[in-house]
Image (spheres, rainbow, N blue to C red):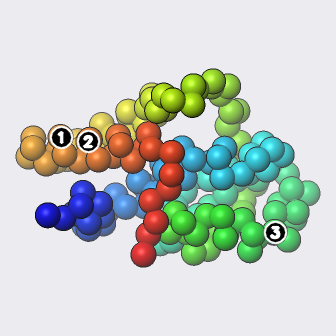
Amino acid sequence: MKKTGAVLAPLLKNLGLESSVRLVRIRHDWYGIFDEPITSHLFPVSFSEKELLLHVTSPIWMQQFSYHKSEILKKLSAYGVEDIRFRLGRIPQRKQEILPDCKAPELTRENRFFIAELLSDISDETLKETIKKAVEKSLTSRTPQRSD
């Protein structure tokens, strides 16, 4: 019997959704990957062809991050990121969430919207429900999925 990830990964790739799922995963884990002050000045905005575009709050921070590009890239490699680019842009404010250690994080409104968009073109209800459960599990788990 195949694992869900072995079946889901090629399906997402064929549907052209792999990059979007990876971006959502990176955003979900962002504050666990990096600490302050990095998270206040750097945020992922798009992911395409294994390249992550990161918004930076100012030219000074952009220069600072460019010096540490290899270290940032190393932390993001577990998410399938092979290159990063920096661009000046807005950084969303972090919402203060207090989650008990024993409780799994719940899906955000953005995550639920993403899942709905992801599933909108799939007509097979069984497949739709399977993908929905897999994506929900992926977005609420605490460890990143490795890409090989």
Q: Residues within 10 Å of mark 3 (few under 14, many from 20)?
A: few
Q: Name the residue under label 2.
A: 132
Amino acid type at circle 1 is Glu
Q: Along the horizontal axis of the image, is 148 left or right of 91?
A: left
Residue 115 location in percent, x, y?
A: 33, 40
Q: Residue at x 65, y 46 (%)?
A: 32
Q: Mark 3 points at which residue?
A: 68
Residue 96 location in percent, x, y?
A: 67, 25
Q: Which of the pair 104/33 is nearer the observer? A: 104
Q: Mark 1 points at which residue?
A: 129
Q: Residues within 10 Å of mark 2 (few under 14, many from 20)?
A: some
- State whether residue 108 appears in this view: no
Q: Which of marks 3 and 1 is nearer the N terminus?
A: 3
Dot 1 falls on a residue whose secondary structure is helix
Mark 3 vs 1: CB contact within 8 A? no
Dot 3 falls on a residue whose secondary structure is loop
User: Residue 148 sits in which quadrant?
Assistant: bottom left
- State whether residue 70 appears in this view: yes
Residue 19 location in percent, x, y?
A: 43, 61
Residue 104's disc is none
Dot 2 falls on a residue whose secondary structure is helix
Q: Which residue is drawn at 46% across and 66% down?
A: 146
Q: Which residue is drawn at 26% across and 66% down?
A: 6
Q: Along the horizontal axis of the image, is 81 left or right of 147?
A: right
Q: Which residue is drawn at 18% across and 64% down?
A: 2
Mark 2 vs 1: CB contact within 8 A? yes
Amino acid type at circle 3 is His
Give the Cα separation between the discs numbered 3 and 1: 41 Å
Give the Cα separation between the discs numbered 2 and 1: 5 Å
